[in-house]
Image: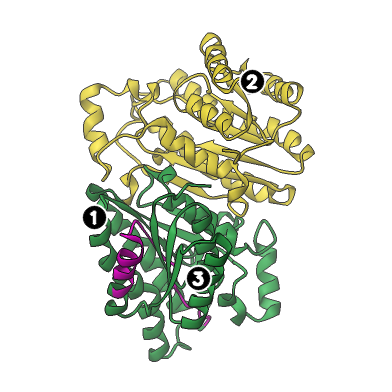
Amino acid sequence: MDRLKGKVALISGGARGQGAAEARLFVGEGARVVIGDVLDDQAAQTASEINSKTGARVAVGIHLDVTRAADWRNAVATCQKEFGGLDILVNNAGIFNMSGLEDTSEELWDSIVNINQKGVWLGMKETVAAMRKRGGGSIVNISSVAGLTGSTGSTAYHGTKGAVRLLTKAAAVQYAPEKIRVNSVHPGLIGTQMIDIIPPDQRQAFHSIVPMRREGKPEEVANVVLFLASDDASYVTGAEFVVDGGLNAV
Amino acid sequence: MDRLKGKVALISGGARGQGAAEARLFAGEGAKVVIGDVRDDLCKKTADEINAKVGSKAVAAIHLDVTRAADWRGAVDACQREFGGLDILVNNAGIANMKGVEETSEEEWDSIVNINQKGVWLGMKAAVPAMRQRGGGSIINISSIFGLIGSSGSAAYHGTKGAVRLLTKAAAVQYAPDKIRVNSIHPGVILTPMVDVIPREDLQPIINLAPMKRGAQPEEVGWCVVFLASDEASFVTGSELVVDGGYTAV
């Protein structure tokens, strides 16, 4: 239970869903975690739940709008002030949308691209310096199976998730000499609030095209993130890890 | 240290190198292991060494020529007889070859395809019924980054490793209803006896193509195999895990 012992992690979108599952799992493996989110109350609540369960101050909630560089700088400063440094970044925050190419408004487009794509870049940009001070680190960017293949609709989402896939590889190549590993995770359908916008009949239809015939649980993605964050993945960088119950294999 | 507790694994090519590293890590995580290899003496020695270290009979050695269906049946029987069943198969055995399309003889072609490709299929075919009896399982097929990209030379090797990638996805889709997960691993340059076929002066330039500018220790692949073998990867199937120090991200 100490696969992340001594490490400090920053998780965006950590207040609930998959990000909160990652925070819980990380702490269970000995890490200390800063949870950033725009949902301030819920971020604080998730942190205090983790702390009371652990019996120590191992998680901190902080306001983090991933589209704002100043918020990222503050989040990194919090990691250093509270826990002495930063070793792991999980770019987990993201929004989902099902609109097709013509049905997407420019406001919607800009919003998705800012959060899902620019947010990932800003997160890496603002954390690399802190990781360099520690002699290395691990960045895990949450893309999607929608970053590997297309579908009807979700046009802007597909674009941003494809961008995250290659941003990851570019950063992996750039920062390998500094011992900072950068990898992407590509979840399929995971049962979190993010996909509540999918109509129930359509959601059920999705299940039938997944070879495992079910949605994934947030913890099942978190296990993959944990692996990539840990030193178990010491030779893994620029890689993409699909966790989708076989959806992308069909 | 019990990520594989209660599980029984069969590892082909387990006498030395990467397969032996996998066997050591598996035993350390609580699994019982049958290592199969054509190198009988070395195989037995590896098993003895691990058993002496663990202080119990955690590992059994068996003769396994992966191109022979009867050997596979013998290996699966050994898992059931010695340890009561089979949960994990690691199709690890393989041979490398640097020859191009025209330089490859028909004998060499047949030999590589039989070991690297037919051996993987035979292994899955023999293991699946035993896993079904246990209510599920995990199969890890060791492909290569040469199953993802081409190079000048190693033509037959590229072909077989590309085949393993898709055999993996086909089996993942077929056996998802049986709760048998099937994934491939794509290592880059791993410092094992297998890469001894590469002349020393040629090896370093190949290693330097990876942004990490180093080859991997066998354990660095072994931990990836442990992850996919364990229940932590419960929603991961038909997936490919690249462990190459960034080689294919460039």
Q: Are marks 2 and 3 in contact (CB under 8 Å)?
A: no
Pick the front one: A53 or A165 = A53
Front label number (1 vs 3): 3
Q: Nearer the viewer, mark 2 or mark 3?
A: 3
Front one among B130 and A122: A122
Q: Residue at x 68, y 48 (%)?
A: B174
Q: Chain of mark 2?
A: B
Q: Is residue A60 left or right of residue A81?
A: right
Question: Given the image, on which type of amino acid does mark 2 rest?
Answer: Ser
Task: Identify residue for label 3.
Answer: A47
Per the image, is B61 magenta? no
Which chain is assigned yellow?
Answer: B
Dots 1, 3 in contact, CB < 8 A: no
A28 left or right, relative to A105:
right
Dot 2 alpha-carbon crowd within 10 angstroms: few under 14, some 14 to 19, many 20 or more: few
Q: Rounded to the nearest whole Å, what is the CA distance between mark 1 and mark 3?
A: 27 Å
Mark 1 — residue? Answer: A132
Q: Specify whether B68 is left or right of A108.
A: right
For the residue marked with disc 1, what is the amino acid? Arg
Q: Which residues are magenta?
A: A74-98
Q: How is the image coloured?
A: by chain
Write the residue at 32% across / 31% down. B153
**Mark 2 — residue?**
B56
Residue B6 percent coordinates (x, y): 69, 35
* Chain coloured green in the rendered structure: A
Q: Quadrant of the C terminus of chain A?
A: bottom right
The crowd level at tag 3 (other Cα within 10 Å; few <14, some 14-19, many 20+) is many
Say whether disc 1 or disc 3 marks the residue closer to the N-terminus.
3
Q: Give the answer, above or below, for where A238 lies relative to B51.
A: below
Circle 1 packing at 10 Å, graded few (<14), some (14-19), many (20+), is: some
Residue B192: name its quadrant.
top left
